[in-house]
Image: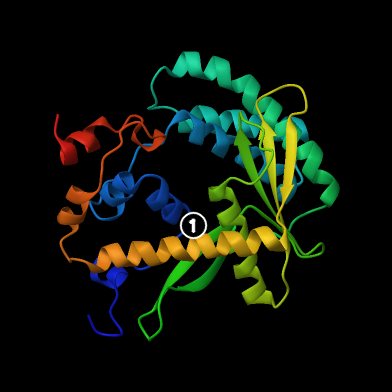
Amino acid sequence: MTDDINGFITHGIKRISVSNVNKFREAPDAWACQYLGGHRFPTGWAAVQGQAVESGVELGLFGGGGIDDCVKESIDQLKSASMVLNNRPEELEKRIPIVTRMTETALENLMPLGAPEKPSEGKRQHSVGIDVRFREGPGGTVPLLGFLDFYYPQHNLVVDLKTTSKSPSKWSLGHGIQAAVYQKAIESMTGKKPAVKFAYALTRKKDPYVELELTDEDAADFLKQFKQTVIQMEALLSMTDDSQKIISVLPHNPDTFYWNNAEEIRKTFYGS
């Protein structure tokens, strides 16, 4: 392999994201079937619920909508995005109150910050990019693209909204890496290191809101782990230009949530 060619280029991977690097680490079989095998994994109820809440919160923070209008937007999005999902009547009955509560909780806690900077026309989120170096030489970097939920330049602050049932007491590896990479990307673009907070709107009724703020020590550790994963990813991709061979040698773990409702993809690559 010449200096200007790397494993990403060999397999037609033009850029990476924090989410697909995390997926490589957490479920390499699912990552390979998606990014080397070309199969898009189905969206489940948890993702649809989170996206619905984000839609309502965006209306309130970017558009100045009232909380009632924002809740309606979240519920409408939940209904429209779930048309093909299983057990829809039962799930909607269960999730509409949760989406309502999460949207209200997020807005009540984020509105005091004032209005975040609006993304460019036609975009839902701010995009950020950075080149990730995994080795020396002209072919030793891969572009990364990410998207910010809410950017407050007046506070030099990035806030990412998460919807979950579990209350975090500390950074998970995946979320910590996301926070650290986004902080690094903003710093490279603006020359200023922003504070990064993850805001967790929880399903529980008592204490339904938790914030985690990234420290410099945490950021350095998470960036180190992120870079190591990218190095390992490129090393695997450099071993062969045969994508199917890479898929075949990675262990398959159907118990990870990535494989929920992905039975047809599993059969395609791993048989019945």
- What quarter of the picture does the C terminus occupy? top left
203 with respect to 250 (left or right)? right
Q: Measuring from the top left, give residue 16's x and y in whole percent.
A: 42, 63
Of residues 82 and 260, the one nearer the viewer is 260
Q: Name above or below for residue 139 compared with residue 184.
A: below
Q: Secondary structure at mark 1?
A: helix
Q: Name above or below for residue 185 compared with residue 70.
A: below
Question: Which residue: 25% across, 51% down?
Answer: 38
Asked whether the viewer can see residue 159, the reply is yes
- Which residue was labeled with disc 1? 18
Q: Measuring from the top left, give residue 123's x and y in whole percent.
A: 56, 58
Q: Measuring from the top left, give residue 189's x and y in whole percent.
A: 63, 75
Which picture quadrant has residue 204? top right
Question: Which residue: 71% across, 63% down?
Answer: 216
Q: Name above or below for residue 183 compared with residue 94.
A: below
Q: Residue furthest right?
A: 112
Which picture quadrant has residue 257? top left
Of residues 110 and 76, the one nearer the viewer is 110
115 with respect to 40 (left or right)? right
